[in-house]
Amino acid sequence: MIAIRPIRPEDHSALLALWRRTAGIQLRPEDDYDPFCAYLQRNPGLSLLCERADELLGAVLVGHDGRRGYLHHLVVDQPFHGQGLARRLLHQALAQLAELGIHKSHVFVLGNAEEALGFWRAQAGWSARHDIQVFSSTGSPE
Ligand SMILES: CC(C)(COP(=O)(O)OP(=O)(O)OC[C@H]1O[C@@H](n2cnc3c(N)ncnc32)[C@H](O)[C@@H]1OP(=O)(O)O)[C@@H](O)C(=O)NCCC(=O)NCCS
């Protein structure tokens, strides 16, 4: 039976292996163990994985800033594509955010990530934004 449960710190190595073998997922320093654990602690119970008898099938990192939800690294392992697992992960993630009063969420997708873009375009309730540009900073203001 396939089950969905919150991600725990001890899932890190299996998740890292999944992210590494998934085309389209770019690992960042924030994916290292310590920041990964800090993220889980800051957003308790929100990040989810699906598994079958201890076999990791897919996962999504989920957080919020008190106003909007943000999703990262939605992945389903290749052999399990097309079985509705990403949809189940998303459904539960958004339901949990809604329980916390977060009714709008964002996901950032690279403009050349065709598979991911195709997925998000196909999801009911999600729409591409053409009225927003994202500006990012990695340092302190001068
Ligand atoms: C994108 C991904 C998570 C989808 O996982 P999945 O479990 O195969 O998706 P699901 O089976 O839940 O599909 C849900 C719906 O989306 C559609 N869909 C899935 N992938 C799609 C794609 N690439 N393009 C268009 N539609 C897609 C399915 O047909 C299904 O449609 P339906 O509701 O009409 O039946 C998976 O392909 C993946 O891990 N890709 C690599 C990582 C990635 O790009 N992640 C996104 C990062 S933002």
Image (tube, rainbow, N blue to C red):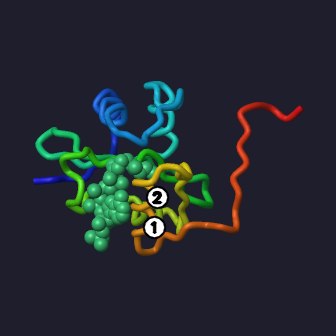
Query: The residue tagged with tag 2: helix, strand or loop?
Result: helix
x and y percentages locating residue 113 in the rendered image? 47, 50
Viewport quadrant of the C terminus: top right
Residue occupying image coordinates x 59% and y 60%: 68
Contact (Cβ within 8 Å) of mark 1 with mark 2: yes
Residue beneath label 2, please?
A: 117
For ligand 1, give the image quadrant.
Answer: bottom left
Residue occupying image coordinates x 25% and y 57%: 85
Residue occupying image coordinates x 52% and y 56%: 107
Query: The residue tagged with tag 1: helix, strand or loop?
Result: helix
What amino acid is at disc 1? Arg
Label of residue 102 in the image:
none
x and y percentages locating residue 35 in the rendered image? 51, 29
Q: Is mark 2 within 8 Å of ligand 1?
A: yes
| Extreme residue in the right direction | 142
Residue beneath label 1, please?
A: 121
Q: Is disc 1 surrounded by few (<14), some (14 to 19) or many (20+) residues within 10 Å? A: few
Front-lying residue, 35 or 138 = 138
Q: Is mark 1 within 8 Å of ligand 1?
A: yes
Q: Is disc 2 surrounded by few (<14), some (14 to 19) or many (20+) residues within 10 Å? A: some
What amino acid is at disc 2? Leu
